[in-house]
Image: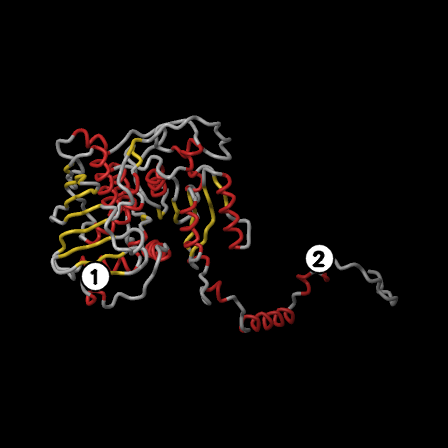
């Protein structure tokens, strides 16, 4: 064995093994020192942003509802803005047939969240396949409202869908059956169901404050139906720019035309351009259904009368769809009349009644027709798995009332409807208009 030298040892580079390794240095004294330091760290106050924990108005990420959107134009952009105001909502994806709209929505979302995470899709099936998305906002053209809603429900998504939600009676029934079977949450975009003045007026009718109800009045937003047109062919844009085939959806094929693409009344329902009755009128007819406690049925008779549409419910209450003779209370007015009183209201938020005593306790005025309350109702039901104010069953029958009214208007005669069998008894001409063929490969 060699003798130790008395000369100073040469300094060597630190190695990762031997006496200079971390393992060699982790002796008993080091262990005790490290343990004491770690314990002190655990006992020290930890600073975590309150918003991350759901405090300070924030919502923890695990508690947020994740939303995607399909077909977001002018109306859809407004409703999406209402969703984006909600603290428990995270918007992550946009699907639209127009590249310009996809990019605009992505810019809005990325600006709000300070990132570049909003995904863009041309094919809605890719969006619906995402397992992280809980719900979708659907504001496509009316052609695709029902088919897209049903596809979303089958993919396990909850749905907020703009109206008109269906094109015909058969689609209305299919929509209700699908959401009943899948258990998904549905909210039709009939947001006046969540506005204070309309809710107050409806309650006066529903709970007998007007005496026995005998007549409900709805503004149809225009009465009149025509068959869909066939506009002159124009040069079709590239699919990435505008997906014309998807825009047509379930409707019969026709050549590209920019007026049809941007038109408001294309294919409203049943092969008809359903006019205001399925657009603005769906709000008012829906409120009349509610006021008459008729959310699970529809009128049994429909007849055009001197520029109006008169209908009768199974309980004898009369529904009058009329454009004229309203008090100056704003758009989408409704009026409910009973044996001892009446009430009328509209989008200005004011109420007028046969007696001021009827209006006691009416609450604060909310003018216009904001969707915020309706969006909030939807989000709360997504969490609780409860029924929304305008759930699929409610939407089914309020739309059936509008579709049946349009059939009577188009045929220009009285029709009789059975809301249990969902048919016009013995009326082959009217029954043919309950549904329409779907263009391949669309399915309901």
Answer few, some or many: residues within 10 Å of disc 1's Cα (few below 14, many 20 plus, some between 14 and 19).
some
The residue located at (12%, 31%) in the rendering is 426
Between the C-alphas of marks 2 and 1, the distance is: 91 Å
The part of the image, by quadrant, that contains residue 130 is top left
Q: Secondary structure at mark 1?
A: strand
Labelled disc at residue 163: none
Whether the residues at callouts 2 and 1 have beta carbons within 8 Å, the answer is: no
In the rendered image of this protein, does residue 55 appear above or below residue 88? below
Query: Left or right: 198 with respect to 8?
Result: left
Q: Which residue is mark 1?
A: 353
In the rendered image of this protein, does residue 137 appear above or below residue 14? above
The residue located at (15%, 48%) in the rendering is 318
Front in this rendered view, residue 169 or 341: 341
In the rendered image of this protein, does residue 273 appear above or below residue 77? above
The residue located at (19%, 32%) in the rendering is 430
- Can you tell which of label 2 and label 1 is closer to the viewer? 1
Answer few, some or many: residues within 10 Å of disc 2's Cα (few below 14, many 20 plus, some between 14 and 19).
few
Q: Secondary structure at mark 2?
A: loop
For marks 2 and 1 on the same chain, the one whose residue lies earlier in the sequence: 2
Q: Which residue is mark 2?
A: 17
Front in this rendered view, residue 158 or 161: 161
Query: Left or right: 205 with respect to 59?
Result: left
The quadrant of the picture occupied by the N terminus is bottom right
- State the image coordinates of residue 120 (x, y, percent, origin top left): 49, 42
The residue located at (46%, 57%) in the rendering is 61
- State the image coordinates of residue 232 (x, y, percent, origin top left): 42, 26
The part of the image, by quadrant, that contains residue 10 is bottom right
Query: Left or right: 268 with respect to 114?
Result: left
């Amino acid at each position: 064995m060699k003798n130790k030298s008395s000369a100073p040892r040469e300094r060597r580079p630190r190695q990762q093994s031997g006496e200079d390794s971390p393992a060699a240095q982790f002796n008993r004294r080091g262990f005790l020192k490290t343990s004491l330091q770690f314990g002190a760290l655990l006992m020290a106050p930890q600073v975590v942003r309150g918003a991350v924990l759901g405090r300070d108005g924030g919502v923890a990420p695990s508690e947020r509802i994740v939303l995607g959107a399909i077909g977001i134009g002018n109306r859809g952009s407004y409703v999406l803005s209402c969703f984006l105001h909600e603290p428990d909502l995270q918007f992550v994806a946009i699907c639209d047939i127009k590249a310009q709209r996809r990019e605009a929505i992505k810019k809005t979302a990325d600006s709000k969240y300070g990132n570049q995470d909003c995904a863009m899709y041309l094919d809605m099936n890719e969006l619906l396949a995402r397992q992280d998305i809980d719900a979708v906002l659907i504001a496509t053209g009316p052609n695709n409202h029902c088919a897209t809603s049903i596809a979303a429900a089958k993919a396990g998504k909850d749905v907020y869908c703009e109206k008109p939600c269906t094109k015909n009676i058969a689609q209305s029934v299919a929509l209700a059956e699908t959401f009943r079977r899948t258990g998904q949450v549905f909210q039709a975009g009939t947001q006046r169901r969540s506005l204070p003045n309309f809710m107050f007026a409806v309650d006066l009718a529903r709970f007998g404050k007007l005496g026995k109800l005998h007549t409900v009045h709805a503004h149809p937003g225009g009465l009149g139906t025509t068959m869909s047109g066939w506009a002159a062919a124009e040069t079709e844009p590239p699919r990435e720019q505008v997906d014309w085939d998807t825009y047509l959806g379930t409707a019969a094929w026709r050549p590209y035309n920019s007026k049809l693409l941007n038109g408001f009344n294309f294919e409203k329902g049943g092969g008809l351009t359903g006019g205001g009755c399925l657009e603005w009128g769906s709000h008012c007819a829906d409120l009349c259904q509610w006021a008459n406690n008729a959310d699970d049925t529809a009128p049994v008779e429909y007849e055009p009368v001197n520029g109006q549409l008169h209908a009768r419910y199974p309980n004898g209450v009369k529904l009058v769809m009329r454009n004229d003779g309203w008090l100056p209370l704003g758009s989408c007015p409704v009026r409910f009349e009973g044996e001892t009183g009446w009430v009328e209201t509209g989008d200005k938020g004011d109420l007028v009644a046969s007696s001021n005593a009827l209006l006691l306790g009416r609450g604060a005025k909310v003018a216009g027709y904001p969707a915020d309350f309706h969006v909030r109702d939807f989000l709360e039901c997504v969490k609780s798995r409860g029924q929304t104010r305008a759930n699929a069953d409610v939407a089914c029958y309020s739309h059936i009332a509008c579709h049946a009214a349009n059939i009577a208007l188009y045929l220009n005669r009285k029709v009789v409807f059975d809301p249990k069998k969902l048919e016009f008894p013995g009326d082959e001409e009217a029954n043919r208009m309950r549904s329409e063929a779907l263009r391949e490969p669309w399915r309901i």
